[in-house]
Image: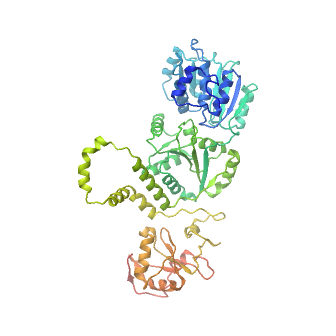
Amino acid sequence: MRTFEELGVIPEIQKAITELGFEQPMPVQTEVIPQLLANTRDIIALAQTGTGKTAAFGIPIIQKINVKQLSPQTLILCPTRELCLQIAGDLTDYSTYVQDIKILPVYGGSSIDSQIRTLKRGVHIIVATPGRLIDLIKRRTVSLSDVHTMVLDEADEMLNMGFSEDIDEILSHLPEERSMLLFSATMPKEIEKITRKYMSDPVEITIGRKNEGALNVRHLFYMVHAKDKYLALKRIVDYYPNIYGIVFCRTRKETQEIADKLMQDGYDADSLHGDLSQAQRDLVMAKFRNHNLQLLIATDVAARGLDVDDVTHIINFGLPDDQESYTHRSGRTGRAGKTGTSISIIHIKEKGKIAQIEKMINKKFEKREIPKGDVICEKQLFNFVDKIEKVKVNEAEIERLLPSIFRKLEWLEKEDIIKRIVSLEFNRLIEYYQQAEEIYEPQEGSSRRGRDDFRGKGDRQDGGARRAEKGYARLFINIGKMDGVNPGTLMGFINDNVPGKVPVGRIDLMKNFSFFEVPEELASKVVSTFKGMYVDERKLMVQIAQDDSGQERGKKKFYGNDSGGKSKKKKVRY
């Protein structure tokens, strides 16, 4: 592998990037830096976000600047204010030891007068969003006549945002004899039009395949009913205790609604969308970059230009309309050589989109089942224990308090203290998943949720029923999670009321009812035992859940009166 010195980078820049943690050039830097330093006229570079693009064009741009000529020599166009500020900040870092170089970010939402004053004092590199730059051009406060290098960063995003005419306008003010570098993650037809119109025999550099997803990103999908998407999102987030991610939504309204729900449910989350003021956007972005937010809920447009290296997960709360947007979304994770995960929560009608995206990014999606509550609780628990093991103890500050703490807790054994610490942290989570209804995957060809409500896990028949284990009968009872039932209380309830010990097999708890299995020879005994019983003034119904053909009965039959007439009212508790 070549070094930065072998690429022709000067010692002043080498020193700065070494202090920033650069060790070896990334592939895109190895390809682009020598070409730009060699004054190659036009370059098209296709590479994913997070592959080191800014340094690939930023290092040679800084090196080629004539600091004695105090006029704009390089123009970098980018789609958003956030990306504009980030590029300018990175270039400033790379040029720490290059004396007298002037770099100016130009963007909307800040004082144009301040930017005009800086331009009058003289700058070498302008990093700009198209709208504000055109405003400055129209005011005749900026001259681009000395620009010898033009960079279009995230060119596909700029075209998606409707900047095509603005780019045309800006390019008309640049000298014909200038180099042009176009960076893009994808290569749509609109990009090809720009290259034909404004570039002359460009060198094309492709890192990976065209439109291919980042190599170190895994792609997963979960298929659920549309009404279960938010509950599925919560389970996925809970399954990854250390998640630091972005949840992409399709609309501003949906973005705000999901963020509000997550915050109400106790998650460190906030929204980023176009209805927020610039000050609000800046505050949210600052919180996310400083890891004061665990989840950023965003629209595609609002997240453009977001450049955070350590995002662990991208979650698509539904797939975007165009496949290129998926590439950009997933490119927000797995950056700077790290691994990442892109997760999509889809409904059955979106299954075809998965195949289309797989073909485009040349990667297969892994299909996953929504995590069960007990698995989530176990994973959270062991993550908590891991944190306890690794926590740094401030001995000096805590030492004076320890004697009082020891006296307070001396009556407890070590095991009791551990149990109480864990319970204090996890009782709410455990109780939530004890009460939570399981989320089932929709079956192809069936659009009725009512049928799925009666499904347990295991083998299913054509009518949607689950076959009981061999030698067992499957029974229905009209109490469920809403009544505070869990497997333990239901088993106790059965054995407290049915004479003799009843071996209870599989239990499937639903919201308002449940299924349980008992040996076939005991089924009629269990059913007859509960006839005429009431729970809190509500008639208790226990029925055999399958008829002779093995098909599960309809809901009306479950709630019908099977007693053959009036029964004596017997109240029971569970």
Is residue 188 positioned above or below 382 on the image?
A: above
Q: Does any portion of residue 310 appear in the rendered image? A: yes
**Residue 136 appears left or right of 491:** right
Percent coordinates x, y for residue 245 in the rendering: 52, 45
Q: Quadrant of residue 418?
A: bottom left
Residue closest to the eye, 252 or 259: 259
Is residue 410 positioned above or below 77 on the image?
A: below
Q: Residue at x 49, y 82 (%)?
A: 561
Percent coordinates x, y for residue 313 in the rendering: 54, 46
Q: Residue furthest right?
A: 201
Percent coordinates x, y for residue 507 in the rendering: 50, 72
Point out the image quarter for the C terminus. bottom left
Q: Residue at x 25, y 57 (%)?
A: 410
Q: Residue at x 59, y 73 (%)?
A: 466
Percent coordinates x, y for residue 317 in the rendering: 56, 50
Q: Does any portion of residue 105 appear in the rendered image? A: no
Point out the image quarter for the N terminus. top right
Residue closest to the eye, 140 or 205: 205
Is residue 538 positioned above or below 521 on the image?
A: above
Q: Quadrant of residue 534?
A: bottom left
**Residue 388 appears left or right of 97:** left
Q: How is the image coloured?
A: rainbow
**Residue 406 appears left or right of 295:** left
Residue closest to the eye, 374 or 493: 374
